[in-house]
Image (cartoon, grey):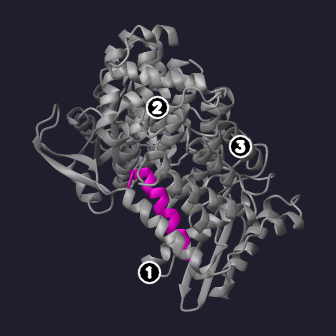
Amino acid sequence: MTASDAAAGSTGSVPPSGPDETSQTGIRQWLAAILAADAAGYSRLMAGDDRATVAALDRARAVFRDQIESRQGRVIDMAGDSVLAVFETAIGAVAAALAIQATVNALADAQEAARQMRFRIGVHLGDVIEKPDGTVYGDGVNIAARLEGLAAIGGITISDAVRGAVKGKVAAEFEDQGEQTVKNIADPVRAYRVSVKADAAPVLASAADVGIDLSLPDKPSIAVLPFTNMSGDPEQEYFTDGISEDIITELARFPLLFVIARNSSFTYKGRAVDVKQVGRELGVRYVLEGSIRKAGNRIRVTAQLIDTQTGAHIWAEKYDRVLEDIFAVQEEVTECIVGAIAPQVNAAEVLRARRRPGNLSAYEIAVRAMALASESQQKSDVAARDEALLLGRQALALDPQSYPALMAIAWAQWLHVSWRTTANRDAAWKEGMDSLARSMELGPSGSMHGMRALLLAYAPGGGRWEDARMEAELAWRAAPQDSLALNGAGYVLDNAGDPTEGIRLLERALRINPRDPRNYVTYGNLAAAHLASRDYAAGLVWARRAIGAAPDNSASHLYMAALHVSTGELDKAQGALARARSLAPESVAHIAHMRIGTEPFQRDESGDGGAHFRRRFRVLLRIAAGLEPASMADELR
């Protein structure tokens, strides 16, 4: 059944009602934004695999319902493969349509081309007649359905009325499709194709969409949203974000709390949010939000803790201090939160959690260095990597005990070593390890152990795998809710011969960090782990998710190539390898020697438990490159 059929069934001969009839019959007429959607190629998908198609439809329906309801919309009908919904505002309808298509298309990208389910969406603003049972009628519904028929597969088409209502108010661009004559509508309808602005923040798939269980943990759970910079100075964003990150870090030290990781919390930056929706999307009971205003040497911090189940304010406070006291305020906020939601955490644990920076200027520089290190990994930006090192060293000159500066240097040098983007890899590796040693003197953390495990895996001479594995164990045991530590540990354990434990840690990292834009790294690591455990079907699912989340990440294409060789799909393997080579030609060059930016796979005779897997990975890629006969794959499956 199509959306047009559903809409036609909702447009009866009921005449427009006057005020008296409305009051007597319960029928009301009102101006609504109507969203109509329909799955493309549904019959073909059902004929190919009806069970998989029904499962995909159920996942898509959940996305529609979640995005519609979170934007004050209401689902009217989900008959067959169609969706009909109404909104109080056109802005809500278009925002929901953009979010739905971003999520549903990402889900489709994770599937083989023949199994991808995508939708067309149409949105119109017009009068509807609503009956007491919630069904709606009228030309507005019919026009929305016709607009849906004009939309591209995976796209959105809206009417001129909607464009006029939302232009400049949503992060979208509009392409004029001209006046369209549509069935059963007397006058032509001017239509516009909608697309996300090129510089708009990406809409992220929800954690549930990639199979993460978001039920509440059996301990107090919290997400710290990025505090709002009220200073009017964009340069203060680093400072404000740094304070928010530090609160997350301090809370994560308490084993009796479940704390959502920074990168997932920060996907809400700059957005007006509904805390109940945040609670559903992250699977937490509490949300902390606040603001920081910095003027001269004075600072004002406000914070409030909210129960996402009820919307009730658990605790709120305002602090007016001189700037030098900001870290004391941070400690007070942390202590108040812990006391409010986990009273069993005693004062001694609060005291042990404190790590106060010694120099405010060094702190601000170090926060910038950390941001640049992250950016350089996401975008393979060597210049950003070098700038992170420069700022990290500047911060250390001001404060030799700057923890974020030391971590930024270790992170940037690990990236240099792993991607071969430095002329002296031995010196880079040594500076990274030395920085971690100095940071551990300030107090060890799971992230430090996780980074040290990664650096040890890339040690000169082919990797110190036994030491790397020991550090990985320390990482996740020291910080069972630190997603960075879990991801590093999971990667190392995958490749050190224990993919089962690696998968467990990586799946836990996704639960703690369900909306991280960098989860493509975790997806890729899970693809490698399932390759190691010879579960090729699951590995391909994770590789597709990794590529769907970050199409330009070369490592994910390398995993895809190895997996396709393992399943006997040599053509697809060659295509994936060619794509990896086009994205990172220097790293994927000299494939015969496995110089692929993943040095642990280079070594054959390391003597550790993962040597066989790393050797197998190398041979699979050599087969994809045509350097070994395809028959060798049979021996490796």
| Disc 2 residue type (three-letter) | Arg
Query: Residue tagged by mark 1?
Result: 233
Which residue: 85% across, 63% down? 349
> How many neighbours does mark 2 have within 10 angstroms: few (below 14), some (14-19), or many (20 or more)?
some
Mark 3 or mark 1, which has the lower sequence index? 3
Horizontally, is 629 left or right of 502 in the view?
left
Location of residue 275 by image quarter = bottom right
Q: Is residue 587 above or below residue 422?
A: above
Q: Secondary structure at mark 3?
A: loop
Mark 2 to mark 3 CA distance (whole Å): 23 Å
Q: Position of residue 5 (x, y in %)?
A: 30, 25
Pick whichever, 533 or 51, lies toward us: 533
Residue 289 visible (yes or no): no
Is the N terminus in the top left, top right, bottom left or bottom right quadrant?
top left
Which residue: 31% across, 57% down? 199
Which residue: 57% across, 23% down? 613
The part of the chain drawn in magenta is 363-381
Q: Position of residue 552 (x, y in %)?
A: 35, 42
**Circle 2 or circle 1, nearest the eye:** 1
Mark 3 to mark 1 CA distance (whole Å): 38 Å
For residue 378: magenta? yes
**Circle 2 or circle 3, nearest the eye:** 3
**What is the number of the mark on residue 216?**
3
> How many neighbours does mark 3 have within 10 angstroms: few (below 14), some (14-19), or many (20 or more)?
some
Mark 2 or mark 1, which has the lower sequence index? 2
Q: Position of residue 154 (x, y in %)?
A: 30, 35
